[in-house]
Image: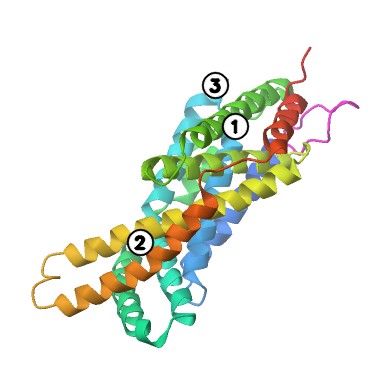
Amino acid sequence: MRVYNATMRQTSAAPAVLPIVQTLALHLEALRHHHSATLDDTQDTAEAIHKVRVTTRRLQADLDLLQFGRNSTVVRDAKQRLRDFRNRLSTMRNSDVFIGIVQAALERADDEDIPDLVMLARRLGEEREQNAAEASKTLKRFKLGRIASVLGEPEEADKKKHRLEFRGLDEARIKRRAARRLEARLGDFLALVARLKDTSDAEGIHRLRIAAKRLRYLIETLTELGFREPKGALRWLHSEQAKIGDWHDLFCLEGEVLALVGAKGANRGRLDESAALLRATAKLLKARDAKASRTFPVKPPNYFERSIRRLVGDLAPAE
């Protein structure tokens, strides 16, 4: 990828910093690779779509550090484009996750539960086929070149506008921006942690999950840039994000099954099938309730906030 050879000034007191433009280039190349894999029928499309979605989050975290001054509008638009693209793939992602949950349950199911779970897997598979067609259209329509042009690969028709300006990047300003964003991301996460005591606020849990992801990807970006890695805090955050995600996936599966059962014609003449879907889902929701007791309320370890604030101090030392 062609990018401006912008480098940050180094001092003996500062950590070695990988230029943000190089990090952007690496993540853009990863997006290009995973996007190509989603269009290859010989590869695991589900895994490729997952990696595409993850890489869009990484790119957003990179871009967020440059959202100031003359780059503000360009960055905001690029982040929104990545977010919209990722959201359009969310239904396909959910289908793959739901099927994975049922398949895992089948491997340990009692004989009496297997027919209901097989029925649920079949119906979810039918939904996945429909979602796959829409996801394929989304992936084929996605103009990766537009993102590339914003990040430094200008297309012929777009050489003079809507591009990031890398020349004259000020290291100190990027660090201050990073410190503010890290403080904000940490504050959002801790505020939601303090508010959520149980599973009665599903929307709050969804927001907590998103807040955990935003905080994690920002920390990982800063680690790639050469700053101190709060390893313990990052490991805990990754683990907690996964547990919250597992609970939320089962919550969403319940909604999906209720929608299938309530769909036009689902009940008329198909009561046995609807009952099977509901019985299988009820079994799966027992696992959700067990996960809830192990996950909520979320309790960050004592070192969590302290180690992240040390990273904030690295970015913007007190004068």
Q: Residue 49: image x %, image y %?
A: 48, 61
Query: Which amino acid, mark 2?
Result: Leu
As measured in the structure, the alpha-carbon distance from the residue carrying label 3 to the one carrying label 1 is 26 Å
Query: Which amino acid, mark 1?
Result: Leu
Q: Residue 175: image x %, image y %?
A: 70, 25
Cβ atoms under marks 3 and 1 closer than 8 Å: no
Q: Is residue 251 above or below residue 118?
A: above
Residues drawn in magenta: 6-19
Q: Which residue is mark 3?
A: 70
Q: Give yes or no for residue 187 being in the magenta stretch.
A: no
Element marked by disc 1: helix
Q: Residue 296: image x %, image y %?
A: 50, 47
Q: Residues within 10 Å of mark 3 (few under 14, many from 20)?
A: few
Q: Residues within 10 Å of mark 2 (few under 14, many from 20)?
A: many
Give the left or right position of residue 246, taking residue 264 as reference.
Answer: right
Q: Which residue is mark 2?
A: 253
User: Residue 186 has which mark?
Assistant: 1
Q: Residues within 10 Å of mark 1 (few under 14, many from 20)?
A: some
Q: Residue sitting at 77 percent across and 27 percent down?
A: 314
Q: Residue sitting at 71 percent across and 27 percent down?
A: 312
Give the left or right position of residue 316, taking residue 125 as reference.
Answer: right
Q: Residue 309's quadrant in the figure?
A: top right
As measured in the structure, the alpha-carbon distance from the residue carrying label 2 to the one carrying label 3 is 43 Å
Q: Give yes or no for residue 15 being in the magenta stretch.
A: yes
Q: Main secondary structure of the magenta part?
A: loop
Query: Which amino acid, mark 3?
Result: Arg
